[in-house]
């Protein structure tokens, strides 16, 4: 029996990027079919993130069914599934600020007209859903061969934000948690991994 220990299958997310696109756009946003396909103009890259990169969490809640006749559980039922991506944005611009604040397209940032080069963004009193598509990509190498992973979330929203620390000793960070939502057709996936990696062959 061959050893299952294969160091060539260890992955390090050496460098990567996070992108967003409008959910429910007409015509539909072009989703890459593989890792060679470039992200289309529908997608906006959010730029630099902190060295923590992206933290992906999948949490399933499973409830057990008990019976009088058995001490052990009789069966288990999936009652909840949550998929989140957490990261900190380092750049502040017309794409990242509305994304963090929870509303509005890039057009929500407008010139004031009072002074050249001055803009404003209004934080809504009554927020509305700001659903987006999200793409995450990282690359590694295996024996000098590029390995690329992409995760595409077709529907989701920023559901939590970190407090912003504004000091003279560090960069401002826009920390967000993006949660995947089910699509209207629940037979469609919550998220899709695309892997350029022969470890799956």
Image (cartoon, rainbow, N blue to C red):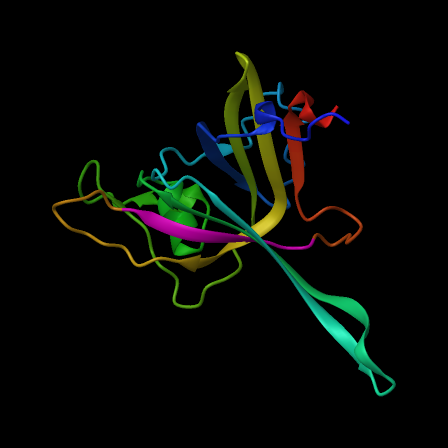
Q: Find the residue positioned furthest to the front.
A: 1
How many numbered marks have been drawn onto this rendered protein structure?
A: 0
Residue sitting nearer the eye, 49 or 198: 198
Taking the image as shown, residue 127 lies to the left or right of residue 21, namely: left
Q: Percent position (x, y) of residue 65?
A: 79, 77
Taking the image as shown, residue 1 lies to the left or right of residue 136, namely: right
Question: Is 153 part of what is drawn in magenta?
Answer: no
Judge whether 88 appears above or below 142 on screen.
Answer: below
Q: Find the residue positioned furthest to the right.
A: 69
Judge whether 107 appears above or below 145 on screen.
Answer: below
Q: Percent position (x, y) of residue 23?
A: 60, 45
Q: Which corner quadrant of the image does residue 126 belong to? A: bottom left
Question: Is 181 part of what is drawn in magenta?
Answer: yes
Taking the image as shown, residue 12 lies to the left or right of residue 91, namely: right
Specify the quadrant that holds the N terminus: top right
Q: Percent position (x, y) of residue 118?
A: 22, 41
**Residue 31 appears in the figure:** no
**Residue 3 appears in the figure:** yes
Q: Find the residue positioned furthest to the bottom.
A: 68
Q: Percent position (x, y) of residue 127?
A: 46, 64
Judge whether 146 appears above or below 54 on screen.
Answer: above
Residue depicted at 80% across the width and 50% down the height: 187
Residue depicted at 32% across the width and 51% down the height: 121
Residue sitting nearer the eye, 112 or 183: 183
Specify the quadrant that holds the C terminus: top right
The magenta stretch is 173-182
Q: Find the residue positioned furthest to the left.
A: 168
Residue depicted at 46% across the width and 42% down the height: 54
Residue sitting nearer the eye, 154 or 110: 154
């Amino acid at each position: 029996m061959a050893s299952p220990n294969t160091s060539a299958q260890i992955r390090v997310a050496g460098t990567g990027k996070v992108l967003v696109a409008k959910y429910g756009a007409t015509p539909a946003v072009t989703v890459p079919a593989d890792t060679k396909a470039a992200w289309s103009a529908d997608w906006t890259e959010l730029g630099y993130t902190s060295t923590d990169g992206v933290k992906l969490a999948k949490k399933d809640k499973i409830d057990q069914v008990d019976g009088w006749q058995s001490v052990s559980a009789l069966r288990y039922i999936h009652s909840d599934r949550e998929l989140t991506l957490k990261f900190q944005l380092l750049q502040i611009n017309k794409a990242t600020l509305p994304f963090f604040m929870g509303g509005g397209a890039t057009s929500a940032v407008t010139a004031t007209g009072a002074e050249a080069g001055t803009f404003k963004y209004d934080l809504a009193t009554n927020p509305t859903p700001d659903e987006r598509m999200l793409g995450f990509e990282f690359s590694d190498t295996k024996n000098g061969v590029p390995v690329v992973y992409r995760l595409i979330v077709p529907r989701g929203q920023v559901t939590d934000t970190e407090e912003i620390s504004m000091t003279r000793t560090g960069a401002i960070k826009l920390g967000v948690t993006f949660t995947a939502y089910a699509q209207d057709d629940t037979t469609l996936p919550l998220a899709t991994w695309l892997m350029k990696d022969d470890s799956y062959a």
